[in-house]
Amino acid sequence: MERTFVIAKPDAVQRGLVGEIIVRLERRGLKLVGAKFLLVSRELAEKHYAVHVGKPFYEGLIRYITSAPVMTMVWEGPQAIAAVRQTMGATRPVEAAPGSIRHDFGLSVGRNLTHASDSPETAAFEIGLWFTEAELVNWQRPTDAWIFEGN
Ligand code: IDP
Ligand code: MG
């Protein structure tokens, strides 16, 4: 079973789309194992987006993610990292597949509503950065056997 880290970014919170994002991930069959609503500090934003330091959009990205509250989450499931990236859609909303969150609710790459880990290494780093072990919940759903093959 894989875990991945997700942010409903400030634009998603301001536009009242947190529920919509959660609904789509729940409906897909993914399981929520952690959630936290917070205002991101510059320090945390810089750690999270360290791979983008020096890129032309970096300063704007830090301003964006620290501008208003975000909803952070950890979701679990088989191939959760790929599944969540697919549900989010491509980074640029106009290149995101129809039916994806970024397609259905976005237009600008700098206001693309969500973040999701892009690899097992990134997921492990980001979950550790944003959540403590005690904030993650191991729980059983009676429906798991109908969603997770081999469970
Ligand atoms: P991802 O969020 O799909 O993984 P990344 O390439 O990791 O995309 O970029 C991180 C975030 O930086 C994007 O989600 C988006 O908010 C922002 N970003 C990426 N490229 C641009 C750009 O060209 N202009 C403005 N913002 C950008
Ligand atoms: Mg990324």
Image (cartoon, rainbow, N blue to C red):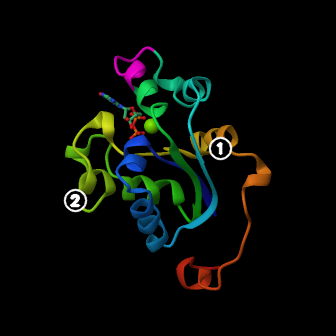
Q: Amino acid at mark 1?
A: Ala
Instruction: Classify mark 1: helix, strand or loop.
Output: helix
Instruction: Find the magenta span and give its range.
Output: 54-60
Identify the mark at residue 124; answer none if there is no mark. Answer: 1
Answer above or below: position of 11 versus 110. Answer: below
Is 59 within the magenta? yes
Q: Residue at x 33, y 51 (%)?
A: 89
**Quarter of the rendering occupied by the N terminus:** bottom right
Counting from the top left corner in percent of width and height, residue 110 is at 31, 33
Query: Which residue is more in the foreground, 147 or 115?
Result: 115
Q: CA distance from mark 2 to mark 1?
A: 29 Å
Farthest residue to the top: give it.
54
> Label 2, on which residue?
98
Q: Residue at x 43, y 49 (%)?
A: 13
Q: Residue at x 62, y 79 (%)?
A: 150
Counting from the top left corner in percent of width and height, residue 129 is at 67, 37
Counting from the top left corner in percent of width and height, residue 41 is at 59, 28
Query: Which residue is more in the foreground, 120 or 11?
Result: 11
Question: 10 Å neighbourhood of mark 2: few (<14), some, or many (≥20)?
Answer: few
Instruction: Classify mark 2: helix, strand or loop.
Output: loop
